[in-house]
Image (cartoon, rainbow, N blue to C red):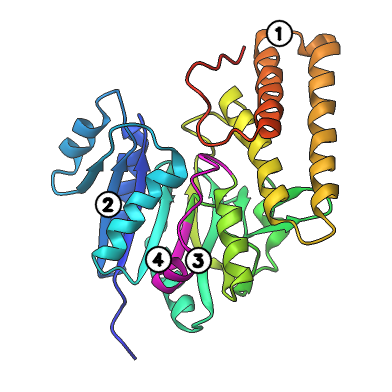
Amino acid sequence: MRDNPPVHVIVLNWNNAADTIECLHSLEQTDYQPLNRLVVDNGSMNGSVDVIREAFPGIELMELDTNYGYARGNNMGIQHAIEAGAEYVLILNNDTCVEASMLAQLVSIAESNTDIGMIGPAMYCYGTNSTIFALGSTVNWKLGETIHRGIFQPATEFSDLYKPEPVDFIPGCGVLVSRKFIETVGFLDPTYFLNYEDADWGIRGKRLGFEIWFVPQAKMWHKVSATLGKASPANTYYMTRNALLFFWRRSPPGYRWIAVLVILLRTLRSILAWTVRPKYRNPEFKALRSANIQALRDFSAGRFGPLPEDTVIR
């Protein structure tokens, strides 16, 4: 049996040093070696880099000159890790914490089957072992939905999940990928900028023959959209636009138009409700409505990547 393969962990930070530091503290407790930690700062403008360096003087830190988004920011870290000899790359959202044994369990399963290219843990909502964020994720092509199994449900309802098993993809907040996967499938697609690039990565990998696995014994905790906010206008924009992009690009033959039409109808229904129902007539829902309208416009016009800086969602 070979020695432990080297793993490089990439933590992407953007204006959120406090969560990044907590994430790094949890990584200090991991029982896996050899392990290299890299913080990629995505153009923070609030002094995050100095705060992180003060808390972790020896940390490897890559400073980017602007916010390149989730995909491209992580890609720069992935490229660095591969060039440095990583056999596996663990991508972690900075608003996560990991159990000490998580990485060892993921690597052990990945090493047992050379077809596994992407693997992930059970994800719980931060601060509890009783509420699920994701137990592996699947795609429903007919309904135009990506599904994080168990999301926001009690963990007791999934007590029968005790064996590692294949899934469609692993949420990008905590995913281990092999060097072979990266070299064969390629990097995260920066066209998305934020949201759905994880589903895209997994589906691309499956179609090239890789297996994607979920390991229930491995655990981590996620604060859920700590950077953008769960239902912020920006998050709503990217979720809507990128859902359309993902299902348009990746749906199997015969499902593309069905999935896109379902998403369009679902989005238009929300826009209508937020327009006519009195309880939604407030600035918060007005901004969400504007975000969805802008998302439909940009998808129709083929505008992807980051939301243009001069776009006002209100």
The residue that disc 2 covers is 38
* Left or right of 262, for residue 123: left
Residue 110 belongs to the span the image colors magenta: no
Which is nearer the N-term, disc 3 or disc 4?
A: 4
Whole-percent x and y of residue 140?
77, 55
Total numbered labels placed on residues in the image? 4
Q: Amino acid at mark 3?
A: Val
* Left or right of 94, for residue 127: right
The mark closer to the camera, 4 or 2, is: 2
Instruction: Judge by depth and name the residue closer to the eye, 244 or 161.
Output: 244
Q: Which range is magenta?
A: 175-195
- How far apart are the alpha carbons under marks 2 and 3? 22 Å
Q: Quadrant of residue 209?
A: bottom right
Q: Residue furthest front?
A: 301
Which is nearer the N-term, disc 4 or disc 2?
A: 2
- Which secondary structure lies at badge 2? strand
* Image quadrant in which the N terminus is located: bottom left
Q: Amino acid at mark 1?
A: Asn
Which is nearer the N-term, disc 1 or disc 3?
A: 3
Badge 4: few (under 14), some or many (20 or more) residues near its Cα, within 10 Å? many
Compared to residue 181, the image places residue 199 above or below, namely: above
The residue that disc 3 covers is 185
- Which secondary structure lies at badge 1? loop
Q: Are marks 3 and 4 in contact (CB under 8 Å)?
A: no
Query: Measuring 60% from the left and 55% from the top, which residue is drawn there?
Result: 200
Badge 3: few (under 14), some or many (20 or more) residues near its Cα, within 10 Å? many
The residue that disc 1 covers is 282
Q: Are marks 2 and 3 in contact (CB under 8 Å)?
A: no
Whole-percent x and y of residue 195?
57, 42
- How far apart are the alpha carbons under marks 1 and 2? 42 Å
The residue that disc 4 covers is 103
